[in-house]
Amino acid sequence: MLAELHRVEQNLNRVILGKAQQIRLALCCLLAEGHLLLEDLPGMGKTTLAHALANAAGLSYKRVQFTNDLLPGDLLGMNIYDTRSSQFYFQPGPIFSQVLLADEINRASPKTQSALLEAMEERQVSIEGETRALPTPFFVIATQNPLFHAGTSALPESQLDRFLFRISLGFPDKAAELQLLQDERLGSRLHLLTEALAPEQLRLLQQQVPKLQIQDQVLEYILALVHASRNTKEQLPLSPRAAKAIVRAAKAMAFINSRDFVTANDVQQVFPYIAEHRLNPQSTAGEHMLSTKLLQSTPCQL
């Protein structure tokens, strides 16, 4: 099973060139059953990564373009009256998919953004007094443009906290961008995905992650990082939910690294992408100043 996961990772690296670290983080987020926030300039490959990840994992995929006039019902679905049967029937919205791409999420109104909160945390939605379960697995990938772009508004802290990772793709290196230009006549590189996991294979992989061993010394290191964030007013403190997120993500990273136990290095690999948008919601992806400072100031006794 792990070999199949690594083949999927290799395939994704053929589609998104020169971004091996970001691809590994995205897979880590999927294995940890979290949600992923991609922040970058338009045209950097955010949507392509989301689509490729869904295809590689063998999951159903729907994309919603978030705009300022998008309503919660457009996302969740609604009851529609059928004149022929004189009854209401439920028309599910695009959220009823295994992978939902919320494209440019920070262009939607707070009311529509908040419609995602229950879905991302509870894997269910409440519509007109009825609770409906979402598909399994359920994975939200949201993209957002930098806040200085016109028509954008900052996500509230409660919304940001629902995302396990926030990452930025960044500009490709010169060699990768040259290959993109040379392959322009071929169109999208999604056709290069030659293998995909079956949904049941992904579920088996996700179920293996919590079983990984994590020693008390590693847990104490995570607690030291979390508590250090609470001892200064320079940033927002990390919550117990953030601490649990670090554990889940570190286990997933250890699993990808072909180990059945977690090390401090696994924690350090994932920490900036989990912590920075919680420590400073106004920061931009790729800027890990506060999280790096916490890592440097917190001794690791391992």
Image (cartoon, helix red, strand yellow):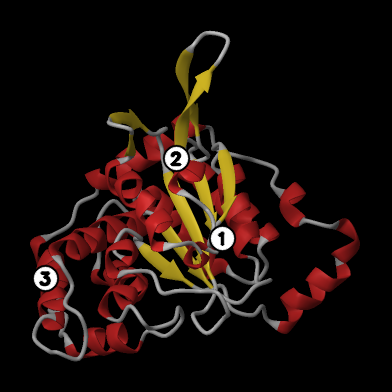
The kind of secondary structure element at disc 1 is loop
The span from disc 1 to disc 3 (Cα, nearest Å) is: 39 Å
Q: Hey, what amino acid is under mark 3?
A: Leu
Could you say which is closer to the camera, residue 166 or residue 78? 78
The kind of secondary structure element at disc 2 is helix
- Look at mark 3 in the image and give the residue it sits on: 223
- Look at mark 1 in the image and give the residue it sits on: 67
> Label 3: how many residues lie within 10 Å, few (<14), some (14-19) or many (20+)?
some
> Label 2: how many residues lie within 10 Å, few (<14), some (14-19) or many (20+)?
many
Q: Are marks 1 and 3 in contact (CB under 8 Å)?
A: no
The span from disc 3 to disc 2 (Cα, nearest Å) is: 37 Å
Point 86% across, 65% down: residue? 184
Q: Hey, what amino acid is under mark 1?
A: Thr
The span from disc 2 to disc 1 (Cα, nearest Å) is: 15 Å
Q: Position of residue 169 (x, y in %)?
A: 56, 73
Could you say which is closer to the camera, residue 125 or residue 143? 125
Q: Position of residue 179 (x, y in %)?
A: 80, 71
**Comes first in the chain, label 1 or label 3:** 1
Q: Are marks 3 and 2 in contact (CB under 8 Å)?
A: no
**Comes first in the chain, label 3 or label 2:** 2
- Look at mark 2 in the image and give the residue it sits on: 76
